[in-house]
Image (cartoon, helix red, strand yellow):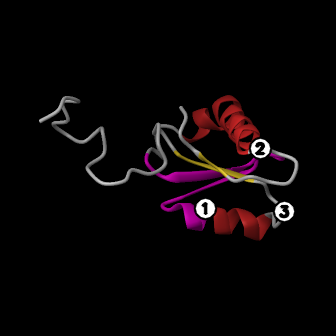
Amino acid sequence: MSGGTAIPYPGLTTEEVARRGQELYERNIRHKVEPEQIGRFLVVDIESGDYEVADDDLSASDRMLARKPDARLYGLRVGRDYAYRLGGRPLDSPGESGGAS
């Protein structure tokens, strides 16, 4: 899974934040949240591994930051290869053929 949202933090590139976030998700979190939370937003603190899941990214981030104001967050959409889509319909919509119409 890739396509999460990485925020740059002092001393870390967005690539490093993304790498740490994905690694924590795959190693410690994925088996706890899939398949029950598919499509919801998850943010993980890349320092502690703590995470929050919510229906939108802002709610998940707000809850995490209320618990850990200094958290370094990486966000993703559970069970998706993307956090957001611009226009069109989701790739996994019923009847999606994957080809051009």
Q: Position of residue 36 (x, y in %)?
A: 47, 43
| Residue 55 vertical position relative to residue 95 in the rendered view, above or below | below
**Pointers 3 and 2 in contact (C-beta within 8 Å):** no
Residues in magenta, as a range? 39-60
Label 3 sits on a secondary structure element that is loop
What x and y, as percent, mark residue 85? 39, 50
Estimate the x, y position of residue 28 in percent, counting from the top left.
Answer: 70, 34
Q: Nearer the viewer, residue 80 or 55?
A: 80
Q: Quadrant of the C terminus?
A: top left
Circle 1 is placed at which residue position? 60
State the CA–CA distance, disc 3 to disc 1.
Answer: 15 Å
Question: Residue 72's image quarter?
Answer: bottom right
Number of on-image labels? 3
Which sits in the foreground, 44 or 34? 44
Q: Nearer the viewer, mark 3 or mark 1?
A: 3
Secondary structure of the residue carrying numbered label 2: loop
- Label 1: how many Cα within 10 Å (few below 14, some 14–19, many 20+): many
Q: Amino acid at mark 2?
A: Thr
Is residue 31 or residue 84 the one in the foreground? Answer: 84
